[in-house]
Amino acid sequence: MCILFVAILWLFAPIAQAEAAGFGGHRGSEPEFSAPPLISLTGILYPPEQKVAGMYRFTVFAKDKEWTFVVEKARNISGLEPAQKILRDLFPSTLYLWGSNKLITPLEKPEVVGKLITIEGYVHVANNIIEVRAVRGLS
């Protein structure tokens, strides 16, 4: 009887160790994936050589065009995390705008300088990429 008990413990010990280490087949076993936050950024684009102040100031690349983007208003559309925290997590303060030509090409033109625009998109914080979904204020 004692041998049977020891054999059962020996068989199930690796399973218990795996669960204790977080590799079990039950609670918490699925990796947690979350979609990137959808945020709305309202601000003004400036030429990179122009010195401007702002709490949230980013070097922005729209394809090959470089701008300085001073964010005046930020809103997290998709979640509870404040948009300001997402902006603080972006380091270095560089953003790459990625999206369709219809959305990105107008942001390359000099006519956007000094206009209050809103860029809405999914922010991939690890790569400093905004997957642009909409741009308002260009017309």
Image (spheres, rainbow, N blue to C red):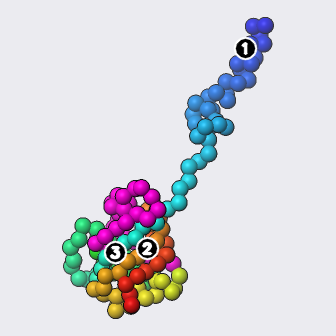
Mark 2–mark 3 distance (CA, rounded to whole Å) = 9 Å
Point 56% across, 53% down: residue: 33
The amino acid type, in three-letter code, at marker 2 is: Glu
Contact (CB < 8 A) between labels 1 and 3? no
Tell me which label, 1 or 3, sits earlier in the chain.
1
Q: Give the range drawn in magenta.
A: 71-99
Q: Judge depth for marks 1 and 3 and give the one in front.
A: 3
Compared to residue 65, the image places residue 41 above or below, namely above
Residue of label 2: 120
Residue farthest toward the top in the current orientation of the protein? 1
* Helix, strand or loop for disc 3: strand
**For residue 61, which quarter of the picture?**
bottom left
Residue drawn at the location 62% of the way across and 41% of the way down: 29
Q: Is mark 2 on a helix, strand or loop?
A: strand
Residue 103 higher or lower than 131, as above or below: below
Q: In this image, 76 relative to 25: left or right?
A: left
- Nearest to N terminus: mark 2 or mark 3: 3
* Residue 106, x across and y down, in percent: 43, 88
Task: Please indicate whether residue 56 sits to the left or right of residue 39 in the image.
Answer: left
Q: Mark 3 points at which residue?
A: 42
Q: Distance between the residues labelled 1 and 3?
A: 66 Å
Disc 1 marks a residue whose amino acid type is Val
Residue sitting at x 46%, y 78%: 134
In the displayed structure, 21 sits above or below 10; it is below
SS at badge 1: helix
Tag 3: amino acid: Thr
Q: In what quadrant of the picture does the N terminus appear? A: top right
**In the image, is residue 97 part of the stretch drawn in magenta?**
yes
Determine crowd level at label 2: few under 14, some 14-19, many 20+ residues with C-alpha closer than 10 A.
Answer: many
Question: Is label 2 in contact with label 3 (beta carbons under 8 Å)?
Answer: no
